[in-house]
């Protein structure tokens, strides 16, 4: 151990003896966490957090997309606008209030397939927690500590592998997942597609909901890497190849993108190499 590391260790041990210094350290940690949060995502709006940028960057190249946690269809609408030749857009949305809006919004759009189901790691039924605001917050993971949950109900769950098999789809260009902490389980249910490299781009959300779900970004990245996918942080104007080990489990709202090798080559010029 170097002299500096030794001195710091002694300082840490001394500060840990007192409640007030420990409380100060916690407050400083929380403020630092806020800095990290603003670094990994400037906004949660798709026109400012990079989601629409990514669709634009892939414009004209997508033929089949799957939107898990479609909400009211903002992402799918942009995918259709950027890809006039889109052959199929499969939307999974279990909230009945959102499904009603989706049916109206995409009533005359032939490529769109609506499914009032949740995607998960296994088929069956899952408890779905309905939030007061239908545009945010409804989820599958346990809702302990949340005050905005109106009700809980059982909904049908499918795996991505089974869903694509039912629809006769052999390849998905873009799988977008936004399920308030259930994202890992959704992608886990696509093991066959991943092993056969049939998913081109996988976009998933990360944040505080992972704590309730008992999931981590580290496990997510390692699973995807095992299938040959490279994971990037999605920024407002491009992808960032960050040092995930340095950034750690920050549990701040952000979006990550896993790319198959051909999409890494395609988006290469827009990938920023940055430690954070």
Image (tube, rainbow, N blue to C red):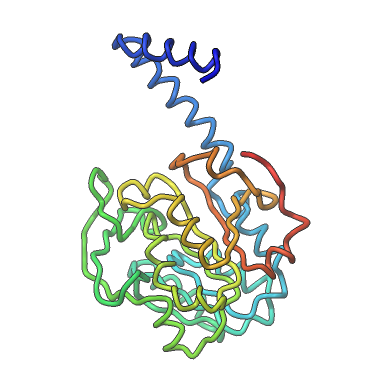
Q: Quadrant of the C terminus?
A: top right
Q: Measured along the vertical axis of the image, is residue 141 above or below residue 246?
A: below
From this viewpoint, is residue 254 visible? yes
Q: Is residue 227 left or right of residue 123?
A: right
Q: Is residue 215 left or right of residue 252?
A: left
Q: Is residue 68 left or right of residue 14?
A: right
Name the residue at 58% across, 41% down.
42
How many numbered marks, from 0 up? 0
Q: Is residue 217 left or right of residue 185?
A: right
Q: Position of residue 123 (x, y in %)?
A: 30, 77
Q: Position of residue 108 (x, y in %)?
A: 54, 84
Q: Position of residue 165 (x, y in %)?
A: 44, 87
Q: Measured along the vertical axis of the image, is residue 13 above or below residue 204?
A: above
* Residue in front for this viewpoint, 125 or 261: 261
The answer to which quarter of the image holds residue 126 is bottom left
Name the residue at 24% across, 43% down.
145
Q: Position of residue 236 (x, y in %)?
A: 65, 48
Name the residue at 56% across, 78% down.
198
From this viewpoint, is residue 109 visible? no
Q: Residue furthest front?
A: 1
């Amino acid at each position: 151990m170097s002299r500096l590391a030794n001195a710091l260790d002694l300082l840490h041990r001394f500060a840990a003896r007192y409640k007030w210094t420990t409380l100060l350290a916690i407050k400083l940690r929380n403020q630092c966490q806020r800095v990290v949060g603003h670094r990994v995502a400037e906004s949660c709006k798709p026109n400012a957090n990079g989601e629409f940028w990514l669709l634009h960057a892939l414009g004209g190249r997508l033929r089949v997309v799957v939107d898990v946690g479609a909400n009211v269809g903002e992402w799918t609408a942009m995918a259709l606008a950027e890809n006039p030749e889109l052959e199929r857009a499969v939307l999974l949305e279990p909230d009945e209030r959102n499904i009603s809006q989706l049916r109206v919004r995409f009533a005359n759009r032939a490529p769109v397939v609506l499914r009032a189901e949740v995607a998960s790691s296994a088929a069956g039924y899952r408890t779905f927690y309905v939030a007061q605001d239908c545009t945010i917050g409804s989820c599958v993971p346990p809702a302990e500590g949340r005050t905005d949950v109106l009700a809980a109900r059982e909904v049908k769950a499918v795996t991505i592998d089974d869903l694509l098999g039912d629809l006769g789809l052999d390849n998905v260009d873009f799988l977008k997942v936004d399920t308030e902490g259930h994202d890992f389980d959704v992608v886990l249910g696509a093991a066959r597609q991943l092993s056969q490299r049939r998913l081109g781009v996988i976009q998933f959300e990360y944040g505080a909901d992972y704590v309730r779900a008992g999931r981590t970004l580290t496990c997510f990245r390692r699973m995807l890497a095992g299938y040959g996918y490279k994971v990037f942080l999605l920024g407002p104007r491009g992808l960032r190849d960050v040092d995930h080990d340095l950034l750690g489990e920050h549990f701040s709202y952000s979006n990550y993108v896993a790319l198959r090798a051909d999409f890494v080559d395609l988006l290469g010029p827009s990938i920023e190499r940055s430690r954070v």
